[in-house]
Structures are given as structure tokens and as C-alpha cells.
Amino acid sequence: MEKRPTNNHKKSNKTNLIQGLIFGILFGFLLQKGGATKYDIIAGQLLLTDFTVVKIMLSAVVTGMIGIYAMKAMGWVKLDIKPGGWSINVIGGMIFGAGFALLGYCPGTIAGAIGNGYLDAAIGGLIGIWLGTALFAELYPRLDRGILKKGYFGSTTLPQLFKVNDWLVVLPVSALIALLLWWMERAGL
Amino acid sequence: MNYLTELRWSPYLVGAGIGILSWFSFLFAKQPISCSTSFARTSGMIERVLRGKKVQEKAYYQKFKLIVDWQWMLVVGIVIGSFLSALLSGDLHLQWVPDLWQSAFGGNPLLRMIAAMIGGIFLGFGARWANGCTSGHGISGTLQLAVSSWISAICFFIGGILAAYFIYHIIA
């Protein structure tokens, strides 16, 4: 299902590993301060009673997107687009969503939940994730020859799909997100 | 430095902070912030300990080698960062059963552990099927306007909202 080289080839020297650790510490600190390391907040989002998670994600997306596309325009960074397909992203996404609701954490926030002291994350959830990924690795050759090929469209971005300048998508999407956040505040969510 | 000991920051501030962190991860690490691949690598490493070197010959672990890389350390860092934040604000809890779960299903830790494990199996399997999770697709992919990530992120929430409704309004 993946046609590009994976990031296995990237350097994994000591500096690189320490850098990853520092990024993780900052990310984990932010997730905990936002409340996203807590089951009640995440399950509350999926029950549509607490909108913290969506507020964090949308403000991260709008901030990140404007910066990344500005740096791309300057030639400072290259995008890293995951290849995908209808069966990969829709079926995988729905299975993920079911697990997201039952576990109440995702792979990033479960690491944060463990640091926060939640034992259901550290014992039950973590072992479950390892079992789920091992099961996928076991079935991968068969899935990769079959269902994962259905509706494959590779690595593409919305501006490429619509054949327009990047900013003709970045600016309207930013405006829409800002409007949505404003509306959520106004509605008291 | 009082803000470091605050229990909560505004979700907008936290989100903007994560967005800015993503600028630097592209700039310095040449890669987006993502998490779920590291869980697959760790799972393979554990299986290798239990079943021997033949595990790393599996096609999936040829694609995602059983190594400790930048992203693997990122996940370790998340545990430490969250621990530090919780410690500073006195928000560190050793808790088996989350309050919301307890309000619907009672305080039995074994029931919660089994549910979390089954949830984890779906989550891990789905994340590898979709080739990313809430960070890799949900934040890093959508902010790059990747088509695969927008579809995935929307499906994470559709699947999650339907399953949460089923769990809390039909089963409970």
C-alpha cells in the first residue's frame, strides 16, 4: 500500500534520537496541559459533551498549516504526504474510531495518559495496541495484495487534487476553521 | 513561572503550541509528528524476544524495521512530558477506572482493563490499516492538506462518535 520509501532510511544517530525525545517531552507537556491525556476528555469529545479535543486539534491544524505552507513557499521544508486510498483510509479510519471510543485514548495520548498515571492505559490499552499491530503485521501480506489496493490514490494534497495554488486552499480552510471555533465558543461548547 | 504549575491551559494555546512544534519538526527533524508506527515497531520487538529472529523477516517489519528511531523516542518523550506537566500541577493520579467510565459501568478495574485492551486491539489494528493515527493523520497530515489524512481524520471521528454512542447509550 505504500509506494514511497519509508522513513527507515533516515539517520538514527544519537543527536537525532535526543531531538525526538525533546520534541516528545514538549508534545506530552502540551497534551497534558490541554487535558488530552484524560479518558473523560477524549470520551467526552466522542460523546459530543466536551469539545476540548477538537479545539486543540483544529487550532494545531490552522497554526501548523499556515507555518508549514509559508516555509514550503520559502523552500525551507518539504511536505511528507502519506499515501492513501478509499479502503485504506475509510475502513482503517472506522476501525480506529471504534477502538478510539472503547479505549478512550489514541496512540499519542495513551503515552501521555501513562505519564499522567492512568493504569487502564498503561496495562490494558498498551497491551491491546501491541496485539492489534501484531495482528495487522501478521495479516499484512494478504491485505496488501487484496483490499488495501481498492481505491488506491497514492500521495496527494487537496491543492494538487483541485489543481490550484496552495494558498487557495490554505486560506479558505483557515477561515473555515476559525469560523467553526468561533461558532463553538459562541454556542458554549 | 506560575503557568507551568497551572492545571489547564486554554485548548487554543495548547493547539497553537502543537502547531508551532510541528513547524520545528519539519524544519529540524525533516518529518512530521506522528506516533502509531512506533507502537508497531515495539510490538514487533516484543514478539521477536518471544518468538525469535524470524519475526523481523515479516513483510511488515521489512517495511517498518524493528528499530528505535526519532519517532520512537518522541513517544517516550510524550510519557515524560505528560508526567512532568502532571507533577508540576499536582495532577498526577494512579487511577484504574476513569470517572466517566465508572459512572456508566461501575468501578470494576478488571472490566475496564478488558475494555481498554479490546479497544487497544481495534485502535492498533485500525491505525496500521489506515497508515496513521490522530497525530500522523489527524494533526500532521491534515495540516499538510493530505487527502488521505482528511479522509482518515473524518472517519476516526465518525467511527468514534458512533462507537461512543453505542457504548454509552445502548450498552450502558
Image (tube, rainbow, N blue to C red):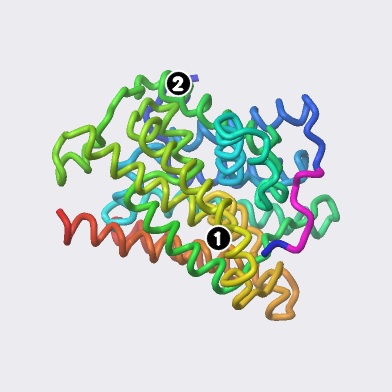
Residue A7 lies in the magenta-colored region: yes
Residue A79 lies in the magenta-colored region: no
Q: Which chain does tag 1 point to?
A: B
Q: Are discs 1 and 2 both within one chain?
A: yes
Seen at 38% across and 31% down, the residue is A123
Is B139 displayed left or right of B69 in the figure? left
Q: What secondary structure is marked by label 1? A: helix
Seen at 72% across and 59% down, the residue is A69
Is B121 displayed left or right of B34 in the figure? left
Which amino acid, mark 1? Ala
Relative image position of residue B3 (x, y in whole percent): 46, 26
Classify residue A39 by image quadrant. top left
Is the residue marked by circle 2 packed among few (<14), some (14-19), or many (20+) residues within 10 Å?
A: few
Which residue corresponds to mark 2? B2
In the rendered view, tell whether residue A40 sits above or below residue A33. Answer: below
Total numbered labels? 2
Seen at 48% across and 34% down, the residue is A111
Point out the residue furthest to the right here: A75
Which residue corresponds to mark 1? B130
Q: Which chain does tag 2 point to?
A: B
Is A143 displayed left or right of B122 in the figure? right
Disc on the earlier residue, 1 or 2: 2
Classify residue A172 by image quadrant. bottom right
For the residue pair B60 and A53, the one nearer the viewer reads as B60
**Which stretch did the figure color magenta?**
A3-9
State the separation of the CA atoms marked 1 and 2: 41 Å
Seen at 62% across and 58% down, the residue is B141
Relative image position of residue B97 (x, y in whole percent): 24, 34
Which amino acid, mark 2? Asn
Does residue B147 appear in the picture of this structure?
no
Relative image position of residue A121 (x, y in whole percent): 38, 35
